[in-house]
Amino acid sequence: GIQVEQSPPDLILQEGANSTLRCNFSDSVNNLQWFHQNPWGQLINLFYIPSGTKQNGRLSATTVATERYSLLYISSSQTTDSGVYFCAGSRGGADGLTFGKGTHLIIQP
Amino acid sequence: GAVVSQHPSWVICKSGTSVKIECRSLDFQATTMFWYRQFPKQSLMLMATSNEGSKATYEQGVEKDKFLINHASLTLSTLTVTSAHPEDSSFYICSARPPVSFNYGYTFGSGTRLTVV
């Protein structure tokens, strides 16, 4: 199956800093998403981005499908950005997502 | 759009009893739904794929007789943890893939935290 590698595993930043999270895939995926898991366990869908670049406020993501990686950018970090960020992918829509191990982000005031 | 509802949010049950978790797609039909399990401080692991009108497909190492899945309609899948034991305590979360026209990717329920005592 697909292997998903996320980096860094942990990241501690001061409020206002920028960060880049990376996700590498062992094989090509046709579906790729970034999630933020809140303290109650809810997965918040940040981006559906099998290829290209998308932006939503202070967050943006870029996927280079030919090189099998994706990046999540967080600018001007706020304490509410703290939590675990997951990337996940699948080959087809009938396949379940394979998740990376996540990046645990802590934003300090 | 693309909402998946999951109930209950949390449940505590006694060892040896069974627990049923429901997953509903509210604004789209889903012939396929997915069930994941997440242990504390770990990632989500796919347990099984639920197929409407046919048997579920289980990932390697997942006991099909312990985790019964029923996909009775195009909007409802249920996961029953049978003869639960403390080691089954975990966070269970379901997912579905809306039609491509939603351009949304997979959407997830809010999860069920199961504690077996």
Image (spheres, coloured by chain):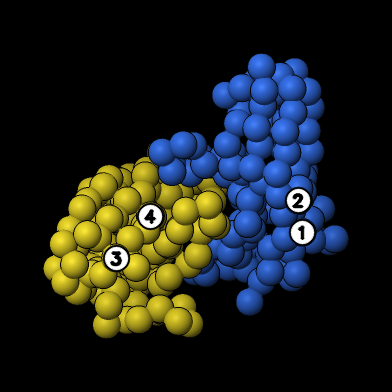
User: In this structure image, what is the colour of chain A?
Assistant: blue
Specify the quadrant that holds the C terminus of chain A: top right
Rendering quarter of residue A76:
top right
Q: CB under 8 Å between callouts 1 and 2?
A: yes
Same subunit, labels 3 and 2: the answer reads: no
Rendering quarter of residue A5:
bottom right
Q: CB under 8 Å between callouts 2 and 4?
A: no
Q: Which mark is residue A7?
A: 2
Specify the quadrant that holds the N terminus of chain A: bottom right
- Marks 2 and 4 sit apart, C-alpha to C-alpha, by 24 Å
- Marks 3 and 2 sit apart, C-alpha to C-alpha, by 32 Å
The three-letter code of the residue at mark 3 reads Pro
Q: Which mark is residue B86?
A: 3
What residue is disc 4 on?
A: B91
User: In this structure image, what is the colour of chain B?
Assistant: yellow
The location of residue B8, given as percent across then percent down, is: 23, 48
The three-letter code of the residue at mark 1 reads Asn
Same subunit, labels 4 and 3: the answer reads: yes
CA neighbours of label 3 inside 10 A, class few (<14), some (14 to 19), many (20+): some
Kindly report which numbered mark, 1 or 2, lies closer to the viewer in this rendering.
2
CA neighbours of label 2 inside 10 A, class few (<14), some (14 to 19), many (20+): some
Q: Nearer the viewer, residue B84 or B100?
A: B84
Q: CB under 8 Å between callouts 4 and 3?
A: no
Q: Which residue does the image show at 70% across and 44% down from the upper left? A: A10
- Marks 4 and 3 sit apart, C-alpha to C-alpha, by 13 Å
The answer to whether residue A34 is left or right of residue B97 is right
Q: Which residue does the image show at 32% across and 51% down from the upper left? A: B113
Asked which secondary structure carries label 3, the reply is helix
State which chain disc 4 sits on.
B
